[in-house]
Image: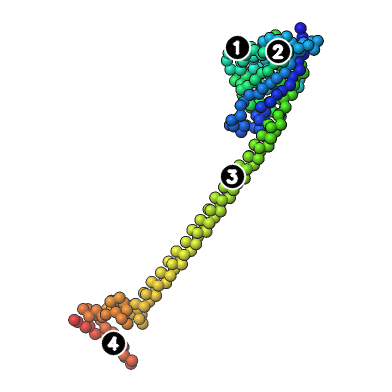
Amino acid sequence: MKKAIQLFCAALLLALLTGPNALAQSVPQLINYQGQLLDAAGNPMPTGDYAVEVRLFPVESGGGSLWGPQVFSGQSGIGFGPKASVVNGRFNLVLGPKDVNTNDLASIFATSASVYIELKVGNGSPISPRQQMLSAPFALSAANAANAANATNAQNAANAVNAANARNAVTATTATTATTALNANNASNAANAANAANAAKLNGFDWTAIFSGGNPASGPLNVAAATVREMSRSGPAAAITVNS
């Protein structure tokens, strides 16, 4: 007998809709899905256990599936689960975390704007129309919180870069100042050395050979082997040798 179905979702855990980062959070990667099975006359299906297959699609009809099947048949293994227990037509399924092909349920909601669920009971045809899966109110808040967190992280990263650039700029300025100071010090030392060299010469004569320290004003005369120039007002200087 052809079956009809009335579906509704209770406490959909669609915090999965917050994006790929939600996979890293401590959110159960499961969806609690509830509904009611009706026969062709609109009466609830008899109480019992039923095999159910679940697939997810991006469109209400046609197209290829995004995820599934997940098979509730009592078989063990990835993507399998116990048969659906139906009471007066009502049932509850826990979808996820993976289908029989080991595809993650959470990834579908992270990458698809619209998701529709399709059920097949036993050997019957898939129940039509598919039902669109919608987010619970708190899931919408979770999505906003994730966006806010991402914005904060981006701002923090920008601040860190700016702080590093500012620190580098200060370091570069300090290095330039240090180089300038070193150059000034070197120039001063060079000037002092030139002045000292000039002071060691008087009237073009290098006094360092006969005066200790090269200073004729205060340096002691080296009389061991000194050549003394006698300066004359009217004649050339006469060189005399003084021996100790």
Q: Nearer the viewer, mark 2 or mark 3?
A: 2
- Measure the C-alpha gap from mark 4 to mark 2: 136 Å
On-image quarter of the C terminus: bottom left
The three-letter code of the residue at mark 1 reads Gln
Q: Which mark is residue 148?
A: none
* Cβ–Cβ under 8 Å for marks 3 and 4: no
For this orientation, the residue located farthest to the left is 244
Q: Nearer the viewer, mark 4 or mark 2?
A: 2
For this orientation, the residue located farthest to the bottom is 234
- Measure the C-alpha gap from mark 2 to mark 3: 54 Å
Q: Which residue is mark 1?
A: 75
Q: Which mark is residue 87?
A: 2
As displayed, is residue 84 above or below residue 139? above
Q: Residues within 10 Å of mark 1 (few under 14, many from 20)?
A: few
Total marks drawn? 4
What residue lies at 53% left-to-right and 53% top-to-bottom? 168
- Measure the C-alpha gap from mark 3 to mark 4: 82 Å
The three-letter code of the residue at mark 2 reads Val
* Cβ–Cβ under 8 Å for marks 1 and 3: no
- Residue 60 image-quadrant placement: top right
Q: Nearer the viewer, mark 3 or mark 4?
A: 3
Q: Residues within 10 Å of mark 2 (few under 14, many from 20)?
A: some
Q: Which mark is residue 157?
A: 3
What residue lies at 61% left-to-right and 26% top-to-bottom? 28
The three-letter code of the residue at mark 4 reads Glu
As displayed, is residue 209 above or below residue 105? below
Q: Nearer the viewer, mark 1 or mark 2?
A: 2
Q: Position of residue 148 (x, y in %)?
A: 65, 40
What residue lies at 28% left-to-right and 87% top-to-bottom? 230
